[in-house]
Amino acid sequence: MLLKIVLDAILINLSFILAYFFRFRVLLFITPGSIPIFEEYLNVLIFITLVWLAIFKIAGLYEEKKFTSLIDEVAALLMGVTLASLILLGLLFLYREFWFSRLVVVNAWLIALLLLGLLRIVFFESRRIMRLKGWGVKKTLILGAGEMGKILALKIAQDKSLGYKTVGFLDDDPAKIGKSYHGIPVLGKLSEAREIIE
């Protein structure tokens, strides 16, 4: 998680730096009243980065278990970047001395979305490849060896990218204890979970 936060901070800064140069070096047909000194933007970027990271934290972007798919994580990223940009625009409206080009904020919103989205794709694919190779796989017990438990075990076995390996079932039915389903044994009763895990 710390690596993702550090990379997010770097990409947020890069987004605003690129947005600045895009606004004042490329969009020359939109003539600004004056071109602000680049160093002034750099000084404000520390505050902006902290605000954005705090909003990302609130949006749950650093909770690994929260997202079951890449689409879910990218959707949360879109919400986080948009909310962070709107808050920044609100600050510009409320505090006139906190001067910052609104067009830079809009440009930064789009650039950040692209860069941070690409980072999420890289992380997601890296995790998936690692799990397929058996790295970072978590041993799992399934509570109940009924139909739903068997379906879940089959799903986990078929999709190694989920990052789980079923080592056994727990079931209170004495007739099932000792039997195997899909090659996975029923290790004992639910009440014995602590001992079996140990």
Image: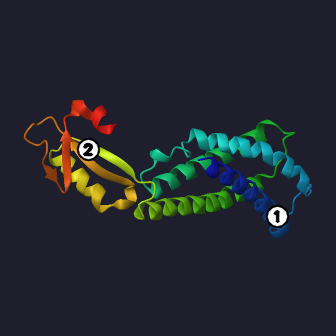
**Residue where numbered disc 2 is placed:** 142
Going from the N terminus, do you reach mark 2 or mark 1 first? 1
Q: Judge the density around disc 1: few (<14), some (14-19), many (≥20) Cα neighbours within 10 Å.
A: few
Which circle marks residue 9 in the picture? none
Marks 2,1: beta carbons within 8 A: no
Q: Residue at x 62, y 62 (%)?
A: 114
Residue 146, image x, y percentages: 15, 44
Q: Is residue 92 above or below residue 39?
A: above
Foreground of the two, 60 or 145:
145
Q: Residue at x 70, y 41 (%)?
A: 51
Where does the image place residue 166, in percent across and percent down from the top left? 29, 51
Estimate the x, y position of residue 56 in percent, counting from the top left.
61, 44
Task: Kindly identify the residue that appears in the image at 86 percent across and 47 percent down.
Answer: 43
**Which quarter of the picture shows residue 187?**
top left
Compared with residue 43, is residue 71 higher up or lower down, i.e. above or below? below
Crowdedness near tag 2: few (<14), some (14–19) or many (≥20) residues, C-alpha within 10 Å:
some
The amino acid marked with disc number 1 is: Phe
Disc marking residue 21 = 1
- State which quarter of the image contains the C terminus: top left
The residue type indicated by label 2 comes to Ile
Q: From the viewer's perspective, is the residue at label 2 or at label 1 nearer?
A: 2
What whole-number distance in Å separates the C-alpha atoms at marks 2 and 1? 55 Å
